[in-house]
Image: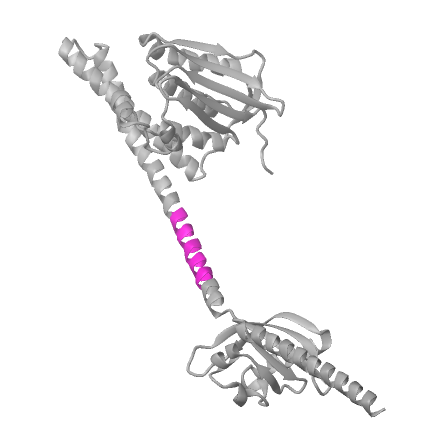
Amino acid sequence: MFLVVSVVVAVLSERIAQREQALRRARDYTRHLLESSPDFQIAVDRDGRITDVNEALEELAGRSRRDMIGASVYDYLPKDPAEKAVAEILEKKVVRDIELTIKTPGKEDLVCNLSGTVFGTTEGEPGVYLTGRDISGRRKAEEELKEYLQRLKQANVRLQEIDQLKSIFLASMSHELRTPLNSIIGFTGVILMGIAGDINEEQRKQLAMVKSSANHLLSLINDLLDISKIEAGKVELSLEEFGLDDVVREVVGGSSPGAAEKGLEVLTEVPEGIVLFSDRRRIKQVLVNLVSNAVKFTDQGSVTIAARVSEDDNLEVRVIDTGVGIRKQDMNRLFEPFQQVGPSLAKKHGGTGLGLHLTKKLAGLLKADISAESEYGKGSEFTFVIPLRYEQEN
């Protein structure tokens, strides 16, 4: 009997030792997890007394674990919001994303994000386990970003005001400049016609150059005026129904003399009967810019105007040339103001670099879209897509 009891005791003792060893391993593992966390960990009872902390909290509070255990958690956390947080955790069992400001000795106040859960203490009473993360840096960055975005917004508003003032100024100045220019062009034309008296060939040559330069300057001013009006929001569309083929005939008629001088063919592939409800003058302006640009940069071959109606009731007009083409690296600058792709082309063909920029602006005004494809040395294709009917906004 004694032997049996001894064996039982030995077995029980061994099992107790094993369980104690397992508990120590579990406790050591838990402590390792607790200490390795960069977030501070704190356990409190239901009365708010600290029962355990980790090294992260020791470092944050500037106090040792021994000093903090048994102390009130409200010595370290703001009392009112912390009491509410503990009560909420005890009621709901788990609560996340509680934001508190913690005062630390000799340091700036820290903004912390807390999460909490309920656990059972060794006395059987519920306690609260808090995990906190210092988000002061993030909050500071968010505030700085918010302040930066506000400044950026104010700067954008100011830039828009300045841009609008610029547009109004340009529009006003353009009107002032056009009046004397029209006089120069008109009187030069009168002299070239011989109405004011005979002139010799050298005088005729020089006056022709004056008139050509004046016309070029007037074209630039007109482009600036149109761009300024669009940017200032002062353009009102004149909507009407009209046939596309009539507009294309006018565009071809206007471009034919320049094309004929270079021996170019101007071809059309436009079905009859296409009717639009839009601004006739602005659409013609877009097509004139595209066709004149094609003629300008094409030395041999042809310029083609092709049109079709898509299934979604949009008109697609393509202007195709067999000209010099555009390099890939220059395509992204194509519709920018005062840009001519390639310095050699700019020197050879002249121009202001405003034509395509104005065309893009006009396309936006007409709720249309314009795009380009090109192969350097073989030609370019510009596509103008516009609704058959311009829908006015209420």
151 drawn magenta: yes
Residue numbers of the magenta segment = 144-161
Residue 95 position in % (x across, y down): 66, 71
- Residue 220 sits in quarter: top left
Nearest the viewer among 202 and 294 is 294
Nearest the viewer among 41 and 340 is 41
The structure residue drawn at horizontal position 48% and vertical position 70%, both measured from the top left corner, is 136
Residue 141 position in % (x across, y down): 45, 63
Vertical side of 296 occupied by 137: above or below: below
Which residue is at the far bottom?
A: 2
53 drawn magenta: no
Residue 65 position in % (x across, y down): 53, 85
Left or right: 304 with respect to 297? right
Residue 44 position in % (x across, y down): 63, 83
Name the quarter where the N terminus is drawn. Answer: bottom right
The structure residue drawn at horizontal position 50% and vertical position 22%, both measured from the top left corner, is 280
Name the quarter where the C terminus is drawn. Answer: top right
Left or right: 307 with respect to 338? right
The structure residue drawn at horizontal position 34% and vertical position 12%, both measured from the top left corner, is 258
Vertical side of 233 occupied by 146: above or below: below
The structure residue drawn at horizontal position 21% and vertical position 18%, both measured from the top left corner, is 209
- Residue 194 sits in quarter: top left
- Residue 359 sits in quarter: top left
Does any portion of residue 182 appear in the rendered image?
Answer: no
Left or right: 379 with respect to 26? left
Predominant secondary structure, magenta span: helix
Number of residue marks: 0
Coloration mode: one colour
Does any portion of residue 255 appear in the rendered image?
Answer: yes
